[in-house]
Image (cartoon, grey):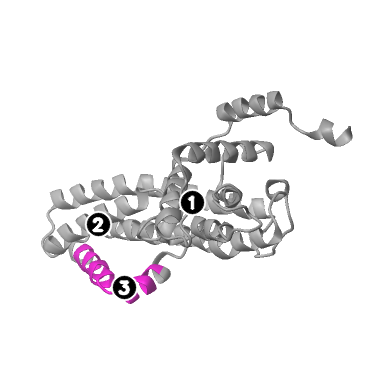
C-alpha cells in the first residue's frame, strides 16, 4: 500500500505535465541540441537509432517534467542525459544504444559541424562583423579620417553590448552547472545534489569530462572576442593621430598571427569587462 501510494496516478502525471509546460522553460539552444542529436543517432550512431517526431516531442516533455520535479524553472544541459533512457530501439538490457545517446549529447557531432556545444549564434555573428571592421581598418589604418574613426567606434559599441550579455549568460550557465554538480570555484568536486539525484556516478563524471570543459571553452571564446572589441575601441579613442594609427596597426598585425594574438590578449587586459 505504501509503495502504491507513492506512485503518480495518471491524473497526477497529467497535472504535473500541464504545470511544467507553463512554468519550466526549454531554451532554444537545447531544443536544437536534441534535434541535432536525432540526426546524429540516425546518421552516425552504430547501430543507427530512428527517433520519430512523436518520440522527440515526448522526450522534450519528459525533460521539462524532470527539471520541474527537481525544483528547476528551466531545462539545463545536464537534463539531456535522460535521453539515454528514451532514445533506444532495443530493450536496454540487451541493446547497446544508450552509450551512443549519452556520447552524442555531448559531442561536436550533435552540436553542429563546428563542434559548438549548446551555444547560440551571438558570438559567431559578432566575430564575423568584427572581422569586417578589421578589414576596413586594414585598408585605412594609416589614413583614418575622423569620420572613419567615429563610424568604426559606433560599430564596435554595437558589437560590445550583445557580446557582454552573451558572456554573462555563458558564465552564468557554467556557474549553474557547477552548482548542479555540487562543485565549487576551487575545483572541489561535490556529491549528488537535488538537481542530480537521478544520475548515476558515471553520468556525473561524463558531464564533468565532456560538458564542463565545453562550457568553459565557450566562456573563453566570448572573453577573447570581447577583448578584441575593447582593445580596438580603446585604440580608436586615442586623441593623438600618430599614436592611434600605430596602436590600431599593431592590433591588426597582431591578430594576423594567431599565436601572437593569443599572447597579446592575455597580456593586454587581464580579465575582460562584463
Q: Position of residue 198 (x, y in %)?
A: 70, 49
Tell which circle, 3 or 2, labels the residue nearer the N-terminal end.
2
Q: How would you classify the magenta stretch by its main secondary structure?
A: helix
Nearer to me, 214 or 137: 214
**Would you say 157 lies left or right of 83 here?**
left
**Counting other residues with Cα less than 10 Å from the Cα at mark 1, is it few (<14), some (14-19), or many (20 or more)?**
many
* Mark 3, secondary structure of its residue: helix
Identify the residue at image location x=62%, y=40%. 67
Report the Cα–Cα distance between label 3 and label 2.
22 Å
Say which residue label 3 marks: 258
Asked whether the residues under the numbered discs 1 and 3 touch, taking CB atoms below 8 Å apart as contact, a structural biologist would say: no
Q: Position of residue 251 (x, y in %)?
A: 27, 67
**Would you say 100 lies left or right of 85 here?**
left
Identify the residue at image location x=51%, y=40%. 55
Tell which circle, 2 or 1, labels the residue nearer the N-terminal end.
1
* Mark 2, secondary structure of its residue: helix
Q: Please provide the residue range marked out in magenta.
A: 244-265
Which quarter of the figure has residue 233?
A: bottom left
Q: Position of residue 152 (x, y in %)?
A: 21, 51
Report the Cα–Cα distance between label 2 and label 1.
28 Å
The label on residue 170 is 1
Q: Is residue 263 magenta?
A: yes
Q: Position of residue 52 (x, y in %)?
A: 46, 42
**Counting other residues with Cα less than 10 Å from the Cα at mark 2, is it few (<14), some (14-19), or many (20 or more)?**
many
**Would you say 263 lies left or right of 17 here?**
left
Tell which circle, 1 or 3, labels the residue nearer the N-terminal end.
1
Report the Cα–Cα distance between label 1 and label 3.
23 Å
* Mark 1, secondary structure of its residue: helix
**Would you say 178 lies left or right of 262 here?**
right
Nearer to me, 123 or 107: 107
Amino acid at each position: 500500500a505504501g509503495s502504491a501510494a507513492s506512485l503518480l496516478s495518471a491524473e497526477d502525471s497529467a497535472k504535473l505535465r500541464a504545470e511544467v509546460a507553463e512554468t519550466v522553460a526549454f531554451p532554444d539552444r537545447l531544443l536544437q541540441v536534441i534535434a541535432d542529436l536525432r540526426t546524429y543517432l540516425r546518421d552516425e550512431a552504430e547501430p543507427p537509432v530512428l527517433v520519430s517526431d512523436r518520440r522527440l516531442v515526448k522526450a522534450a516533455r519528459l525533460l521539462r517534467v524532470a527539471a520541474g520535479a527537481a525544483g528547476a524553472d528551466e531545462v539545463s544541459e545536464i537534463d539531456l542525459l535522460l535521453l539515454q533512457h528514451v532514445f533506444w530501439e532495443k530493450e536496454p538490457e540487451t541493446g547497446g544504444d544508450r552509450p551512443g545517446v549519452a556520447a552524442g549529447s555531448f559531442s561536436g557531432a550533435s552540436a553542429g559541424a563546428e563542434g559548438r556545444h549548446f551555444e547560440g549564434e551571438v558570438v559567431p555573428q559578432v566575430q564575423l562583423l568584427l572581422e569586417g571592421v578589421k578589414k576596413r581598418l586594414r585598408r585605412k589604418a594609416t589614413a583614418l579620417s575622423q569620420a572613419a574613426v567615429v563610424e568604426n567606434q559606433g560599430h564596435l559599441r554595437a558589437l560590445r553590448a550583445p557580446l557582454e550579455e552573451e558572456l554573462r549568460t555563458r558564465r552564468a550557465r557554467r556557474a549553474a552547472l557547477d552548482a548542479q554538480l555540487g562543485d565549487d570555484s576551487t575545483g572541489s568536486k561535490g556529491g549528488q545534489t537535488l538537481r542530480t539525484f537521478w544520475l548515476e556516478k558515471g553520468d556525473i563524471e561524463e558531464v564533468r569530462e565532456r560538458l564542463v570543459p565545453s562550457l568553459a571553452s565557450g566562456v573563453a571564446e566570448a572573453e577573447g572576442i570581447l577583448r578584441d572589441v575593447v582593445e580596438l575601441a580603446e585604440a580608436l579613442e586615442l586623441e593623438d593621430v600618430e599614436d592611434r594609427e600605430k596602436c590600431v596597426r599593431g592590433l591588426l598585425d597582431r591578430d594576423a598571427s594567431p599565436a601572437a594574438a593569443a599572447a597579446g590578449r592575455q597580456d593586454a587586459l587581464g580579465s575582460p569587462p562584463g
